[in-house]
Amino acid sequence: MKGDPAAALLRLADVSLRALYLERDGVRIELLHYDSPGHEGDGSPRAMNRLGLTHLSLRVDDLDALLAPLEACGGRILRDTRIEPQPGTKVIFATDPDGTLVELVQQPGG
């Protein structure tokens, strides 16, 4: 996406970006890379009590099996956040390579 329509929509002058869409089970996630004007920020996770989007939460089938592949793809596991609040339930935070917090929840049932 490049040029005036994208610049107006995104409120960024001289914008040039690439988009990748991940789809599964009716859910679509859009990933963006800004060739121009680049990005801002240092990739630190946002504090959970900040206004605006602080994290994504995803339900997973096998939390433990997911951790190594996530790290291999550039994610970071925040091991000190892991909890097991009840039998069969495991929860942990990770970050994507850009520092976005992702809550991973393994929970029995539907």
Image: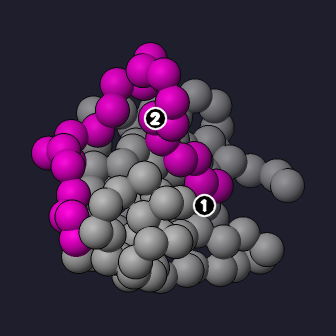
Q: Position of residue 65 (x, y in %)?
A: 44, 69
Residue at point 46%, 35% (across, down): 54
SS class of the residue under badge 2?
loop
User: Does the segment drawn in magenta span residue 27?
Assistant: no
Task: Name the kind of residue labelled 2 in the image.
Answer: Thr
Q: N-terminal of the two: label 2 or label 1?
A: 2
Answer with left or right where residue 20 lies relative to residue 22: left
User: Does the segment drawn in magenta span residue 45?
Assistant: yes
**Mark linked to residue 15:** none
**Mark linked to residue 60:** 1
Residue at point 59%, 54% (across, down): 58
Rendered view: 85 above or below 71: above
In this picture, which residue range is highlighted in magenta? 36-59
Task: Name the kind of residue labelled 1 in the image.
Answer: Val
Residue at point 23%, 76% (across, down): 35
From mark 2 to mark 1, how far is it between C-alphas? 19 Å
Q: Position of residue 84 (x, y in %)?
A: 52, 34
Which residue position is annotated with label 2? 54
